[in-house]
Image (cartoon, coloured by chain):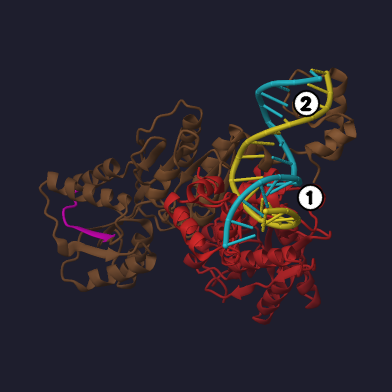
Chain colours: A brown, B red, C yellow, D cyan
Amino acid sequence: MVGIKDIAKMAGVSVSTVSNVINGRKNVGKETRERVLKICEEMGYEPNLIGKSLKSGKTNTIVFNFSDFERTFYLKIIKGINDYLSENGFDLIVCTTSSSKNFMRNNFAGGAIILDKKMDNDFLISVADEQFPIVVMDRIVNKDYIKSVIVENYTVMCDFVQSLINKGYSNFGYIGGIESSLDHQERFQAFTDTLKNNNIPFQRTNYYFGDFTEESGYRAANIITLSNNLPEILVCANDNMAIGAIKALKESNYSVPEDISVTGFDDANAAETYGLTTVTIPRYESGYLAAKELVEMIQGTGNNDIFKISAKIKWRSTVK
Amino acid sequence: MVGIKDIAKMAGVSVSTVSNVINGRKNVGKETRERVLKICEEMGYEPNLIGKSLKSGKTNTIVFNFSDFERTFYLKIIKGINDYLSENGFDLIVCTTSSSKNFMRNNFAGGAIILDKKMDNDFLISVADEQFPIVVMDRIVNKDYIKSVIVENYTVMCDFVQSLINKGYSNFGYIGGIESSLDHQERFQAFTDTLKNNNIPFQRTNYYFGDFTEESGYRAANIITLSNNLPEILVCANDNMAIGAIKALKESNYSVPEDISVTGFDDANAAETYGLTTVTIPRYESGYLAAKELVEMIQGTGNNDIFKISAKIKWRSTVK
DNA sequence: TTGTACGCGTTATCAT
DNA sequence: ATGATAACGCGTACAA
């Protein structure tokens, strides 16, 4: 590995001169500057990030933390983040939780975007400061230098359910889950609130449990077909469960949407294949905006208000 | 940020003693050890990786480089890599090309796994050495300390086509593409070689061009339906094109596989939905094995023979 | 314009 | 058993 020292030796100057040349300072003679640059070129010199960040305490590296390898839309978020950061001269490193913590504690990185729920709030609160701001996605953390970027589930879900009511649906079933994520709580709250505002009853017996996998939606729908009270429409907390439900319903010879309508949430890749009516979350854009908010905090122009991303209803064929 | 120095001050000992405690050396008194550990705990001390690798010149960090955000199976590869590395005490950072280069040039990282084709061979050859071995996926680079991990396309494709011939097919169509990736070259070579070995003619007019997107498969199949020579079976170079072709065929009222059979390659997520007969590539395993090979090179027990991953035929309903 | 000395966090070596 | 110090690669303040 060729370092600043080697260059200095070859150019017959001191390391500080090399450092000055590399960092574009003007206190170097033209002839010396050119000679040093030429040698750097020839030797393929690249500054050592370790030495650099060790000394300066500054860095252009951003950490993105995630861990759910099942959700393919995470790639879209990463792409959004990557695009904004590379447009703005930052390096991105993507890590899972344990590695992320390593890179967040030293001043190796200049900020982080956190998606993984396994990354606990206490840790984030302990490391976030002016020198290391953090953006958290899909959760809310109230602390200086921590900004929350969340999907506006509540509003869109209210709109969605209201639209369904306007279409004439009144007998609703819901497949949710035990998972108490903020996302899901909001979706379900919006669901019940909107029904209540329209004086439409919703009985707890019409709430079915899943775990957000296709398999669990399949099981839930099989149970529903065995009940003597088939809802007109089955609202599912995500697409995977909705698709599982559709499979089960078809196997039991129910037509969708003629006999029963089904909706999802996420607009996963498979949603289009099944013609599933669902809610599109702008994943790429949310990554891009999260990165933008982070960079603004780093540059001192940001704030830590909650940033809400709006979603859109995607009407397809599983609803009449 | 709390460092070894702070701990030393609080415990009233020297930094060396703290270092010795942290690194589990036995030359420390029991009472001192306990006191230091307690303070570390209280202060939330974590060793600084930068200082560590600055001193030792060694690192447990591995770079994984990729950039194609469209291929969702990349997540499976990453998971495979991540699992092996975390089981073996390495940290993984995932970056796109430009950032990757930054982290590969200093001794910040101890090795790299390269998937992105944009990362040119010349660069890889220039940085790979004993201190920084590299695993390349889906390409072959002949150089010490660079190991190639590739999917064994040729053999499985030969088996696949031979099985189809054994089933009685003899009039083949092929949707390939201009992309001259090693992967695709091998698949097509295996296709033509196997036909030739069986004395089955394949005319160039039965080769249709796509660009590996669903859309291009759709267009290609529409052209095929307009020809007066519908093949018995349409072999596609990947699943996306096969699915596009199936959609086009169905829209033209051809039944699959009754009127025409279709095969893909990849076993993408949607393949199961369409009942597509295809070839499964063990993505997770290939990531896991790539990481394993890299770690072995780092530990000096590896070699740079080409590592071939075998794929399996997945028979579904689009073939008779 | 150039060079010297120091500090960043850690570990290894040598001394006490 | 414990401590003092040099070293890693770089940037920078300050001296020459």
Instruction: Please tell me which residue is depicted at 39% across the width and 55% down the height of the picture.
Output: A275
Based on the displayed image, in which of its 4 quarters is residue A142 positioned?
top left
Looking at this view, is A160 or A72 the one in front?
A72
Q: Using a 10 Å C-alpha cutoff, classify the residue at mark 2 as few (fewer than 14 neighbours), some (14 to 19) or many (20 or more).
A: many
In the image, residue B134 above or below residue B88:
above
Asked if residue B18 shows in the view, the reply is yes
Identity of the amino acid at label 1? Answer: Val
Is B105 one of the magenta-colored residues? no
Q: In this view, does B34 lie to the left or right of B55?
A: left
Q: Is mark 2 on a helix, strand or loop?
A: helix
- The answer to whether residue B222 of the structure is visible from this angle is no
Front residue (pair D5, B258):
D5
Q: Could you tell me the amino acid type at mark 2?
A: Val
Q: Does residue A255 lie above or below B220 as drawn?
A: below
SS under mark 1: helix
Please provide percent x and percent y for residue A295.
Answer: 51, 33
Q: Do marks 1 and 2 share a chain?
A: no
Q: Is residue A170 magenta?
A: yes
What residue did someone put label 2 on? Answer: A21
Which span of residues is magenta-colored?
A: A168-176
Question: What's the residue at 33%, 64% (across, down)?
Answer: A211
Residue beneath label 1, please? B127
